[in-house]
């Protein structure tokens, strides 16, 4: 990759997560829509599936750091992004404890998929993600909120989570 690109990073990660076989994950949205149909939580799932999840992506922060000095051609830069994954998990199971277990299963599977490939399955687009931005640096910062019942005939329990991930992209510019 010769230049830093938010679009390339977003597209690569969306594609990787959507195709990683994450338990209960139905859809990954690179850019949140104004309205998400209820059925999107269960797209591609077997009939009768009671739990499903969506992920909305957002590149929250970005900064560049010069990593090499050269004459012509120019040296390289590392672009650091903070990627926020807003995870919305819904379960129609009668007990909130069962919905909580399914949510943790989803989150474990999501974290496992991130740890499985430090380049999000790419060559040249993502230098590294899920590894921190410095040696020993913190990464994969997960906050899980309390489950809450949603009004409606199906007695749905919704649990929201926010996962922050460091994403690094190298550009020879």
Image (cartoon, rainbow, N blue to C red):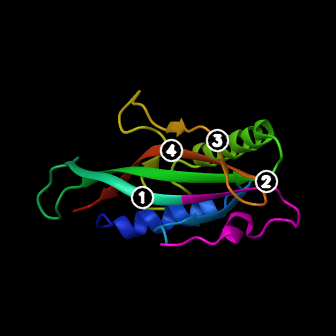
Is residue 126 in view from this perspective? yes
Q: Which residues are magenta?
A: 34-55
**Element under label 2?**
loop
Q: Residue at x 41, y 27 (%)?
A: 136
Q: Earlier in the sequence, mark 4 or mark 2?
A: 2
- Please state the horizontal and vertical placement of residue 57, each as a whole percent of the image: 47, 59
Please name the residue shown 73% across and 70% down the image. 43
Give the residue at mark 4: 163
How crowded pointer 1 is (Cα within 10 Å; few <14, some 14-19, many 20+) is rated as: some
Q: CA distance from mark 1 to mark 4?
A: 11 Å
* Residue in view at x 50 percent, y 65 percent: 12
- Left or right of residue 72, residue 137 in this image: right
Q: Is residue 46 inside the magenta stretch?
A: yes
**Horizontal side, residue 111 vs residue 86: left or right:** right
Of the two numbered discs 3 and 2 on the same chain, state the one appearing first in sequence: 2
Kind of element beneath mark 1: strand
Q: Quadrant of the C terminus?
A: bottom left
Q: Which residue is mark 2?
A: 92
Name which quarter of the figure residue 99 lies in.
top right
Residue 147 marker: 3
**Sequence-wise first label, 4 or 3:** 3
Instruction: First in sequence, mark 3 or 1: give its number.
Output: 1
Judged left or right of residue 8, residue 44 is: right
Determine contact: label 4, label 2, CB under 8 Å.
no
Residue drawn at 44 percent across, 51 percent down: 84
Q: Nearer the viewer, residue 58 or 39?
A: 39
Q: Secondary structure at mark 3?
A: loop
Residue 58 tag number: 1
Q: How much space separates mark 3 and mark 2, taking CA atoms?
A: 12 Å
Q: Nearer the viewer, mark 4 or mark 3?
A: 3
């Amino acid at each position: 990759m010769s230049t830093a690109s938010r679009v390339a990073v977003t597209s690569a990660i969306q594609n990787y997560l959507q195709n990683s076989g994450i338990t209960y994950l139905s859809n990954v949205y690179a850019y949140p829509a104004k309205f998400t149909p209820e059925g999107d939580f269960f797209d591609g799932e077997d009939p009768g599936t009671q739990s499903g999840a969506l992920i909305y992506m957002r590149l929250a922060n970005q900064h560049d750091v010069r990593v090499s000095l050269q004459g012509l051609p120019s040296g390289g830069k590392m672009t650091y992004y903070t990627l926020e994954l807003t995870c919305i998990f819904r379960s129609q199971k009668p007990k909130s404890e069962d919905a909580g277990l399914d949510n943790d299963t989803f989150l474990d599977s999501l974290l496992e998929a991130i740890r499985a490939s430090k380049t999000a399955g790419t060559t040249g687009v993502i230098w590294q993600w899920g590894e921190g931005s410095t040696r020993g640096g913190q990464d994969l910062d997960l906050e899980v909120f309390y489950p809450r019942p949603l009004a409606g005939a199906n007695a749905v329990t919704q649990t929201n989570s926010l996962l922050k991930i460091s994403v690094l992209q190298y550009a020879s510019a």
